Amino acid sequence: MNEMVNHNNQAGRLHKILTAATNQQDGIPTIHAWANVFNVDQQDKSSIFKMLILLQEASDDIKHKITHMEGINSNLFLSQHTNIEQVVKASNLDAGWSNYKHYLSLAVMLNLAHCAEALSRYDEKPIDVDELTGLETDIVDLFDKVAEGTIDPTLKEIILDLLEAIRRSIAEYKIRGANGIREELAYFIGKVIQNKDLIKNNSELEEMSSLWKIFARADNMTTVALNVVQIGQHIMKLLT
């Protein structure tokens, strides 16, 4: 069934994640099941908790969108949603995964697949995995270079913050989608506005040039995925 599900919106992405969760072994701790699904270290509880919060937000947003859609029976589309909430809002992550896995029945997953179809107006064009991986690699490389460099300490802190924001949104792409990356680009612009003079005074630095290239790539990716207008030109206007 998973192959027939529309994975290009929030409900579809959640369906894909929960399908991976149903494939986890019953006897392992719930927190380990989620670590496997999110592909993070089992000891990295902070990252696991953050991803679960994003899942909860996605679940709530799906419910909100379906509830306020016209022309559909929202009660029918959300008839199984409480079972999903039982899983993504699990209160005892040390408990065996079987305590939560049983909520993800075929009926629940089918219902969520129907929600994904209903929310097709919010579809995104998928971003190629290799593109995301390549961008993340460049972000990490620049992050290390800036962290080890001798540029102005305040500027260094700003650049590292912006790089980490984009890197984090790539790691969260499977939940937040392209819109999550776009939100961090908006944060990027806000940070540039706040520190306009400092950034203009250091515009000739190689690190700044590399930062703009990373922003432009993320901007291009999300522009295509979301079918929106590029926002990179706004940064250039701010700095002239």
Image (spheres, helix red, strand yellow):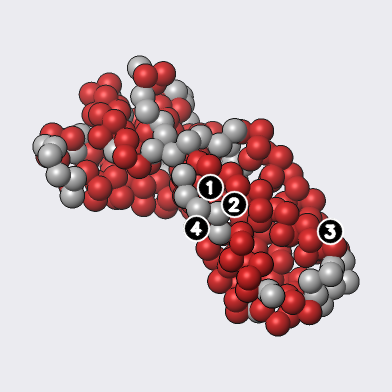
Where is 160 relative to 227, above or below?
A: below
Residue type indicated by callout 2: Asp
For the image, the number of numbered tags is 4
Q: Nearer the viewer, mark 1 or mark 4?
A: 1
Q: Are marks 2 and 1 in contact (CB under 8 Å)?
A: yes
Q: Which residue is drawn at 63% across and 74% down?
A: 238
The three-letter code of the residue at mark 1 reads: Thr
Residue 173 showing in the rendered view: no
**Label number found at residue 223:** 1
Residue 219, labelled with which disc?
Answer: 2
- Which residue is at the far bottom? 197
Q: Which amino acid does label 4 sit on?
A: Glu
Residue type at the position of mark 3: Lys
Q: Mark 4 points at which residue?
A: 183
Residue 147 as seen in the image, left or right of residue 66? right
Under tag 2, what secondary structure?
Answer: helix
Against 53, residue 118 (above or below) is: above
For marks 3 and 1 on the same chain, the one whose residue lies earlier in the sequence: 3
> Which residue appears at 54% of the width and 47% of the height?
222
Q: Do the residues labelled 4 and 2 touch (CB within 8 Å)?
A: no
**Residue count near mark 4 (Cα–Cα under 10 Å), binned few <14, some 14–19, many ≥20:** some
Spot occupied by residue 134 in the image (x, y as percentages of width and height): 71, 40
Q: How far apart are marks 1 and 4 (CA)?
A: 12 Å
| Proximity of marks 4 and 3: CB atoms separated by less than 8 Å | no
**Nearest to N terminus: mark 1 or mark 4:** 4
x and y, in percent, of residue 151 in the image: 85, 73
The Cα–Cα distance between marks 2 and 1, rounded to whole angstroms, is 6 Å
